[in-house]
Image (cartoon, helix red, strand yellow):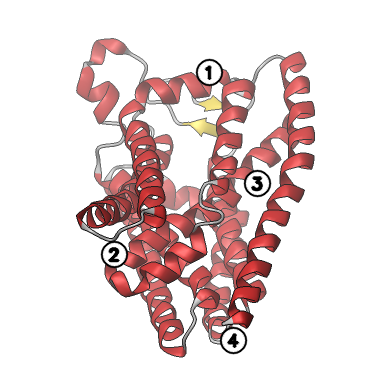
Amino acid sequence: MLAIIIIILGTAFVLYTVLGGADFGAGIIETFAGEKEEQTISKAIAPVWEANHVWLILAVVILFTGFPLVYSSLSQVLHIPLMLVLIGIIFRGSAFTFRHYDVGHGRSHKYYSFLFKASSFITPMFLGITLGALILGRITFDQSVGFYEMFMSPWCNVFCFVMGMFSTSLFTYIAGVFLIPEATTAKERHKYFRFSRYALLATIVSGVLVFFAAFYEGHSLIPDFFSSPISITSFALIAISIPFMLRLIRTNNSLLLRAGIGLQVAVILLGWFAIQYPTLIVVKGGDNLTFYNTHAPPATLKQLLIALIVGLILVIPAFIFLFRVFKIKERREGFLK
């Protein structure tokens, strides 16, 4: 029962990284591509940008119900980066809605666009920072250490900021790949292909820097990585998949492109999970919070699992139907034009 809940939690995390990451990365690409790409990007993410947060909500519900100690600990110690994540999500969604459905394109449109682009950086950055704080092992629940040591030191460091750079680069790469099939001209398609390559390079560089930053901060990430066969295999698969993905990008096959980037993200997260499991929060000078010492009573887990199964049966077909409806609508509009 607990294993199934963990698998669902991991799947929700992967789906949010891929789908939500594509949305946030689109805002980052628009920042560098300019206003010319606003129409294509807005059209691509408008039908689904809000629906993608379903997977984040699902992950939060699982933590809140199934692992309440982890949820309360995160909400307390990492409330600053988590608050910035939420602010970014709220501001970005509001700005996109007002910008996309605004009647005019005056001064307010520029303000909405600026807020949309800025928030597209803030959320991925602080999601990576929060993840880095869970790994680094500077979280403490001893309130006598002072405000900085308890609420700032766990995430305000080199390793966490490099993790933020990695997640931002990864989201941009995902968005670039997703936007290639959305391009309406060969010139626009080439531009997204170029952004995908640059973002992939930034992801690789920042991924390497994560290991150096971990060594600098005294974290055992490098020995932990080399002691995990799953992590080493994941790294090898990612390295092998890069040239195939670059070749696939040129084919403009939307189904294979999105399946390929989804598999890459899943393998990256699997490699991290293999190092981290079963720990959820690495605690400084204390017992780590794991799946096994923080889970709710069996009766609660049983009800949670029933609710998850029923919810997924309802959500997944509706999600697929949503994508199909809007893609059919786009193809018809393109045919009429």
Sequence-earlier tag: 2 or 1: 2
Q: Is residue 312 above or below residue 293?
A: below
Sequence-earlier tag: 3 or 1: 3
Would you say the residues marked 3 and 1 are in contact, meaning their CB atoms lie under 8 Å apart? no
- Crowd band around label 4 with a 10 angstrom C-alpha radius: few (<14), some (14–19), many (20+): few
Tag 3 secondary structure? helix
What residue does disc 3 label?
Answer: 11
Sequence-earlier tag: 2 or 3: 3
Q: Is residue 21 above or below residue 236?
A: above
- Whole-number angstrom distance, CA of label 4 to CA of label 1: 47 Å
Would you say the residues marked 2 and 4 are in contact, meaning their CB atoms lie under 8 Å apart? no
- Whole-number angstrom distance, CA of label 2 to CA of label 3: 30 Å
**Numbered disc total:** 4
Tag 4 secondary structure? loop
- Crowd band around label 1 with a 10 angstrom C-alpha radius: few (<14), some (14–19), many (20+): some
Spot occupied by residue 70 in the image (x, y as percentages of width and height): 51, 23
What residue does disc 4 label?
Answer: 251
Sequence-earlier tag: 4 or 3: 3
